[in-house]
């Protein structure tokens, strides 16, 4: 009888540890995808709540953090369908005060916002959650080769988008003879 | 410019973001969502069961007439239903089968109510957390309780003791609010007047 009670307690402890360990990385990945800090926080909280609601299943996922990010992005789509409103990403730029307040680089966010959504998802999962290609493919439900292709295109696009800010980031392009 | 040179600023640009939502709020939302889903599934299952019963009745009446009382299904020993405003009603059925504390505990957990359920004894922790009156109240029916999961204080859970009477025809419910991580002290004593446990009006089982 008490075994079951211990099991529930273990699940709580496990989820709390998962949340504390992954909350910031997930938030950043979601923010990198939706390019809006406040919306990202709402989506992350909702996705983590859904993870807790089905924790026995989510905890066995190949990447529970990836599941959270993917759920947040799906939630955003369903919210958008329900509310029938959305700010086009390409035209959306985070408010300067908000960006500076949270230390977000405005140029980077604009460059990310200009990427097609799938490229943005791939680059945030690979870069901000440190998922490998296989896991990213599983989370997004696409082929590993497609992940590689999207990542390559995203990097090319970011390179173009950030080229004007290279001095700000102390990035120097090395030209090989 | 290497990929790393390019991607580092992207990673660094978001490093100032930190999740502000406390885990308690996330878990509370998740628990409420789980409870709503269970209630929906229970409702669907009940509707399906009623439909199947109606179909079976109509098919059966076409072929034969059962004698009165024959084939009467055994009622569950208890029912757990979702009430208004997130409340949960636990009812003991007077014609139900034997009480299974593990099944009751599991059903309560599915409604987001952590609990210790025992038969013939009541478990407690020392000291007793406050607030049990906000969590449990007698159900409109005399044989059950209404539980308000949202009022369960953080770090506590419920303890139910089910006490069948010696002639096994009645059952009484006693309950406590207990601390989650404290040692349990269980007693078979059904209590004397003035003891700090909470009784439900005796139900006929």
Image (cartoon, grey):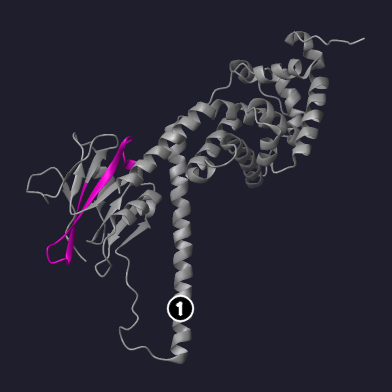
**Dominant secondary structure (helix, strand or loop) of the stretch shown in magenta:** strand
Q: Percent position (x, y) of residue A66?
A: 61, 36
Q: Is residue B164 magenta?
A: yes
Q: Residue at x 68, y 29 (%)?
A: A126
Classify residue A6 as left or right of residue A146.
left
Residue B153, image x and y in percent? 31, 37
- Locate residue A166: give its quadrant: top right
Nearest the eye: B164 or B45:
B164
Q: Residue at x 44, y 60 (%)?
A: B42
Query: Residue B176: in sight, yes or no?
Result: yes
Residue A50 lies, with reference to residue B54, above or below; the image says above
**With A35 as the anchor, is A159 left or right in this view?**
right
Of A88 and B12, which appears nearest the observer?
A: B12
Residue drawn at the location 47% of the way across and 57% of the way down: B40
The residue sitting at 70% across, 39% down in the picture is A137
Q: Is disc 1 surrounded by few (<14), some (14 to 19) or many (20+) residues within 10 Å?
A: few
Q: Nearer the viewer, residue B173 or A56?
A: A56
In the rendered image, residue B198, in percent from the top left (x then y), is placed at 17, 48
Q: Residue furthest right?
A: A177
Q: Is residue B135 magenta?
A: no
Looking at the rendered structure, the secondary structure element under dot 1 is helix
Horizontal side of B123 relative to A113 (left or right) equals left
**Quadrant location, the C terminus of chain B:** bottom left
Please tell me in which quadrant of the rendered image residue A67 appears.
top right
State the count of labels.
1
Q: Which residue is mark 1?
A: B54
- Measured along the vertical axis of the image, is residue A54 above or below residue B79? above
Q: What residue span does the magenta drawing correspond to?
A: B151-175
In the displayed structure, would residue B46 be above or below residue B177?
A: below
> Residue B201 falls in which quadrant of the image?
bottom left
Q: Position of residue B171 (x, y in %)?
A: 18, 61
């Amino acid at each position: 009888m008490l075994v079951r009670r211990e099991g529930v307690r273990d699940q709580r402890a496990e989820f709390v540890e998962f949340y504390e360990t992954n909350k910031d990385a997930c938030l950043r990945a979601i923010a990198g995808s939706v390019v809006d800090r406040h919306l990202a926080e709402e989506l992350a909280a909702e996705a983590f709540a859904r993870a807790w609601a089905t924790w026995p299943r989510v905890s066995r996922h190949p990447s529970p953090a990836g599941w959270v990010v993917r759920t947040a992005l799906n939630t955003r789509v369903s919210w958008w369908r329900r509310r029938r409103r959305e700010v086009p990403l390409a035209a959306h730029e985070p408010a300067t005060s908000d960006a500076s307040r949270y230390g977000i680089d405005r140029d980077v966010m604009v460059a990310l916002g200009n990427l097609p959504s799938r490229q943005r998802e791939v680059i945030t999962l690979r870069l901000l959650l440190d998922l490998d290609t296989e896991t990213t493919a599983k989370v997004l439900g696409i082929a590993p080769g497609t992940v590689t292709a999207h990542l390559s295109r995203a990097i090319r696009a970011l390179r173009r988008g950030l080229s004007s800010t290279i001095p700000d980031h102390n990035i120097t392009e090395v030209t090989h003879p | 410019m290497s990929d790393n040179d390019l991607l580092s600023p992207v990673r660094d640009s978001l490093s100032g973001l930190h999740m502000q939502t406390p885990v308690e709020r996330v878990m509370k939302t998740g628990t409420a969502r789980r409870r709503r889903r269970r209630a929906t599934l229970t409702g669907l299952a009940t509707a399906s069961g009623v439909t199947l019963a109606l179909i079976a009745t109509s098919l059966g009446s076409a072929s034969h007439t059962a004698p009165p009382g024959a084939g009467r299904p055994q009622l569950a020993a208890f029912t757990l239903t979702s009430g208004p405003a997130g409340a949960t009603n636990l009812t003991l059925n007077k014609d139900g089968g034997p009480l299974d504390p593990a099944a009751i505990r599991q059903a309560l957990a599915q409604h987001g109510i952590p609990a210790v359920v025992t038969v013939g004894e009541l478990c407690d922790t020392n000291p007793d957390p406050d607030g049990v009156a906000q969590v449990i109240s007698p159900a409109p029916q005399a044989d059950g309780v209404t539980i308000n999961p949202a009022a369960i204080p953080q770090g506590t859970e419920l303890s139910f003791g089910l006490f069948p009477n010696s002639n096994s025809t009645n059952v009484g419910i006693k309950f406590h609010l207990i601390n989650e991580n404290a040692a349990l002290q269980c007693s078979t004593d059904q209590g004397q007047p003035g003891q700090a446990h909470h009784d439900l009006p005796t139900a006929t089982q």
